[in-house]
Amino acid sequence: MVSGQGRGSNMQAIIDACKSGKINGEVALVLGVKDDAPAIERARSQDIPTLAISPKAYETTEAYDAAVFDALAAANIDLICLAGYMRVLGQNIVDHWRDRIMNVHPALVPSFCGKGMYGHHVHEAVIARGVKFTGVTVHLVDEEYDAGPIILQRVVPVDEDDTADTIAARVLIEEHRTYTDAIALFAQGRLRAVGRKVKILPSASSRNTIAGR
């Protein structure tokens, strides 16, 4: 699920990881809010199914959420990946795909996260606060902003001469790698949410080795 403005670089990383075999799956649908959004056009150019559902076309938020739910269900979606999607998901969607919705955040949650903390705002806050490290968090999505159980995190050092732009460029590289790593683990059946934590289960080959001993 993509935004109306973003370029879709995380979406592209997921598409590429599916094509390369890193992720044992396929992008069944790219869903956004504007038909001419850069990410939608990018997906369409690669023959990925796309659909734009504009919130403005619905009288209520509930009606919009129902339309999104129906589109996801019709496409038999196993995992929802938020890639710049800026709206809060409807409760119907969160409930149905509980522990099967992921988001990537360009900081180390629980720092620099929550409502209003997205995109360049995060990196500007990092520079303003003077922290020495930032990073990337991939987490499951629940009812609160950036509050779901954490799947993976990676650290990115902040140098003294960094700007919001230079940090953003380095963090984005780690976003692509970390997000696709998390999705690959999901596709392998190796993620299990337990309360506020996500356990990463051993791979099948590791389990077989242990059983053989």
Image: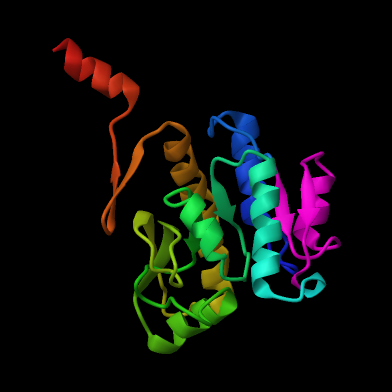
Asked if residue 82 is positioned above or below residue 203 in the image, the reply reads below
Q: From the top left corner, tell me how far across and down residue 119 is, in percent.
A: 58, 73
Q: In front here: 77 or 174?
A: 77
Is 95 in the magenta? no
Asked if residue 119 is positioned above or below residue 22 in the image, the reply reads below
Q: In front here: 110 or 63?
A: 63
Q: From the top left corner, tell me how far across and down residue 115 is, in percent.
A: 49, 80
Residue 56 figure quarter: bottom right
Q: Is residue 178 visible?
A: yes
In the orientation shown, which residue stands out farthest toward the bottom? 128
| Residue at the image position 68 percent from the left and 39 percent from the top | 28
Residue 73 figure quarter: top right
Q: Quadrant of the N terminus?
A: bottom right
Q: From the top left corner, tell me how far across and down residue 206 is, in percent.
A: 27, 23
Asked if residue 127 is positioned above or below residue 136 in the image, the reply reads below
| Residue at the image position 41 percent from the left and 65 percent from the top | 135
| Residue at the image position 34 percent from the left and 72 percent from the top | 110
Residue 84 figure quarter: bottom right
Q: In front here: 162 or 18?
A: 18
Asked if residue 178 is positioned above or below residue 90 in the image, the reply reads above
Q: From the top left corner, tell me how far across and down residue 189 is, in percent.
A: 40, 33
Question: In this picture, which residue range is highlighted in magenta?
Answer: 29-55
Q: Quadrant of the C terminus?
A: top left
In the orientation shown, which residue stands out farthest toward the left? 213
Q: Is residue 163 visible?
A: no
Q: In screen coordinates, is 112 left or right of 192?
A: right
